[in-house]
Image: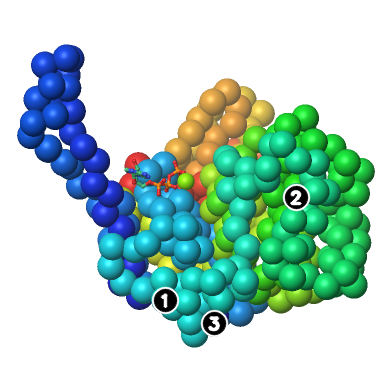
């Protein structure tokens, strides 16, 4: 469905010296800096996948999404959507994709939401029956109809994001790029958005590439993760497989009746506060049951719980801090 090969993007930015003299000098000598925002990225995404595309600020995620959706021209490499090159057949390919940027609306501020939808209906030549059907489905998931007469200018951020999502789905694209769609959404809007993503993926088999800093989005939606940093590929694989590989441990949390906590040879005590001690252990090394048995032979335990390495551990390790 999506084939990205050796994709790169360089930004050239003009360097200005400080102050007036610097600005004047800039008029004479043009110094430019080059930022290698995306370096040689290659990956393949199958139809119907939901892929979490993540990385720290400035990693190159939005730049990649803009190249994949035809908004930016790559410096090098190619993007094929359903076998067609986005730079060579932009018009045709764009019919197959939808894109939403949580930070920036693509809706017209001066129109009512419904007017923007009507406009898109004409641009994409969507038939009335298809249009009505899509709007019904979107209404069931996002409750969009109550917003249809509202001017975009008067919408709250969450309402606006919902509008953007529906606008991106009207022409029933096969691929949906979502760049931080949950940014600044409240808990319930976030919940509807996740429901929306799951539903269009299941019902319409829409392929989804999702950028987010919300670990809950990833845990809830993505089986596969692509992690980039400094424009380079860090990880590409199954979420659970990546977790097991880069964070192959669990944490046992034990509450005692007093502040004294025994150590265990096969565990690292990563925390000890009051009556509670936290033991980290390698999954391949020992089981939680054995540790509990060993510890309770030394002291009586009041309570225990086990924490799996979470997505936040993975991110910390993969992002390199
Ligand atoms: N229009 C531009 N001109 C010059 N440099 C840019 C431009 N857009 C992005 N950059 C630079 O390219 C790099 C990648 O930016 P990008 O927006 O793709 O990152 P990101 O992964 O989306 O980050 P975030 O999580 O903050 O959204 C950054 O160093 C950024 O400063
Ligand atoms: Mg971004």
Q: Nearer the viewer, mark 2 or mark 3?
A: 2
Q: Tell me, yes or no, if residue 93 can be seen here.
A: yes
Comparing 283 with 92, the one in front is 92
Which residue: 57% across, 69% down? 94
As drawn, the label of residue 82 is 3
Tell me the quarter of the picture where residue 46 sits: bottom right
Q: Is mark 2 within 8 Å of ligand 2?
A: no
Comparing 77 with 292, the one in front is 77
Report if the CB atoms under discs 2 and 1 are less than 8 Å apart.
Answer: no
- Residue 115 in percent (x, y) is at 80, 48
Task: From the viewer's perspective, tell me whether residue 179 is left or right of residue 184.
Answer: left
Comparing 160 with 220, the one in front is 160
Task: From the viewer's perspective, tell me whether residue 232 is left or right of residue 218.
Answer: left
Which residue: 26% across, 54% down? 10
User: Could you tell me how far apart the alpha carbons at marks 2 and 1 are, in whole angstroms?
Assistant: 28 Å
- Mark earlier in primary sequence (2, 1): 1
| Type of colouring | rainbow
Q: Is mark 1 within 8 Å of ligand 1?
A: no
Residue picked out by circle 1: 88
- Mark earlier in primary sequence (2, 3): 3
- Residue 31 in percent (x, y) is at 12, 38
User: Could you tell me how far apart the alpha carbons at marks 3 and 1 are, in whole angstroms?
Assistant: 13 Å
User: Could you tell me how far apart the alpha carbons at marks 2 and 3 are, in whole angstroms?
Assistant: 28 Å
Tell me the quarter of the picture where residue 133 sits: bottom right
Task: From the viewer's perspective, tell me whether residue 255 is left or right of residue 203.
Answer: left
Comparing 197 with 227, the one in front is 197
- In what quadrant of the picture does the N terminus appear? bottom right
Residue picked out by circle 2: 116
Q: Circle 1: is it few (<14), some (14-19), or many (20+) Cα within 10 Å?
A: few
Which residue: 59% across, 31% down? 276
Q: Is 65 rendered above or below residue 163?
A: below
Q: Is 185 rendered above or below residue 225?
A: above
């Amino acid at each position: 469905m999506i084939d990205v090969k050796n994709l790169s993007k360089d930004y050239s930015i003009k360097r200005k010296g400080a102050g007036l003299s610097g600005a004047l000098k800039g008029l004479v000598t043009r110094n430019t800096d080059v930022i290698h925002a995306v370096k040689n990225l290659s990956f393949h995404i199958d139809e119907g996948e939901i892929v979490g595309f993540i990385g720290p600020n400035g990693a190159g995620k939005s730049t990649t999404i803009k190249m994949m959706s035809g908004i930016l021209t790559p410096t090098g490499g190619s993007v094929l959507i359903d076998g067609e090159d986005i730079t060579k057949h932009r018009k045709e390919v764009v019919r197959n994709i939808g894109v939403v940027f949580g930070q920036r609306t693509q809706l017209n501020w001066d129109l009512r939401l419904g007017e923007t939808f009507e406009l898109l209906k004409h641009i994409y030549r969507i038939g009335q029956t298809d249009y009505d059907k899509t709007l019904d489905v979107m209404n069931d998931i996002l409750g969009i109809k109550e917003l249809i007469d509202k001017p975009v200018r008067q919408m709250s951020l969450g309402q606006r994001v919902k509008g953007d999502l529906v606008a991106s789905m009207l022409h029933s694209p096969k691929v949906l790029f979502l760049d931080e769609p949950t940014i600044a959404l409240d808990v319930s809007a976030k919940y509807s958005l996740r429901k929306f993503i799951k539903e269009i993926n299941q019902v319409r088999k829409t392929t989804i590439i999702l950028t987010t800093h919300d670990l809950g989005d990833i845990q809830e939606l993505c089986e596969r993760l692509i992690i980039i940093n400094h424009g380079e590929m860090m990880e590409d694989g199954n979420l659970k497989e990546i977790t097991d590989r880069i964070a192959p441990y669990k944490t046992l949390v034990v509450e005692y009746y007093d502040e004294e906590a025994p150590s265990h040879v096969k565990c690292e005590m990563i925390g000890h506060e009051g009556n509670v001690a936290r033991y980290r252990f390698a999954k391949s090394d020992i089981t939680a049951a054995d540790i509990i048995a060993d510890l309770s032979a030394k002291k009586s335990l009041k309570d225990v719980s086990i924490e799996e390495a979470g997505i936040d551990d993975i991110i910390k390790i993969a992002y390199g801090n």
